[in-house]
Amino acid sequence: MVRVSYEQKPLRRTLIQLYGADIHTSPSNITDIGKKILQENPGHPGSLDIAISEAIERVMTSKNAKYSLGSVLNHVLLHQTVIGLETKSSLS
């Protein structure tokens, strides 16, 4: 999880943990990419690009890691759009 989101959104972190997942801040000391970024800038706030890069590296180097695409894809955007349109209609 991007470091800034990890720190600003503790309820998301808790929800992820309730589903049994381990969660780490990105950039992290777990991946080569994260280690390189933290070496150059120890206080780096992270970014979605870095988090995805670390997740892909982790999946490629671990037998137990899984990767699920998130909210930047059409199926999630469509879902969010429908909810938004329903909410807008209800409030009209």
Image (tube, rainbow, N blue to C red):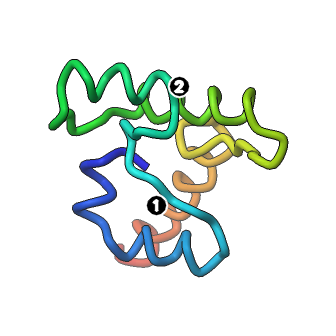
Give the side of residue 5 with respect to residue 86, left or right: left
Q: Callout 1, which amino acid?
A: Gly
x and y percent of residue 6 in the render? 33, 58
Q: Is residue 52 above or below residue 87?
A: above
x and y percent of residue 56 in the render? 64, 29
Residue lying furthest right: 63
x and y percent of residue 15 in the render? 51, 76
Q: Callout 2, which amino acid?
A: Ser
Q: Is there a contact, CB below 8 Å, between mark 2 and mark 1? A: no
Whole-number angstrom distance, CA of label 2 to CA of label 1: 30 Å
Residue 18 in which image quadrant: bottom right
Binning the other alpha carbons within 10 Å of mark 1 as few (below 14), some (14 to 19) or many (20 upward) gives few
Q: Quadrant of the C terminus?
A: bottom left
x and y percent of residue 79 in the render? 62, 55
* Residue in view at x 21 percent, y 18 percent: 40
Residue 21 in which image quadrant: bottom right
Residue where numbered disc 2 is placed: 53
Near-viewer residue (69 or 42) = 42
Binning the other alpha carbons within 10 Å of mark 2 as few (below 14), some (14 to 19) or many (20 upward) gives some
Q: Is residue 67 above or below residue 34?
A: below
* Residue in view at x 65 percent, y 75 percent: 19
Residue 67 in which image quadrant: top right
Residue where numbered disc 1 is placed: 84
Q: Nearer the viewer, mark 2 or mark 1?
A: 2
Near-viewer residue (65 or 73) = 65
Residue 4 is tagged as none
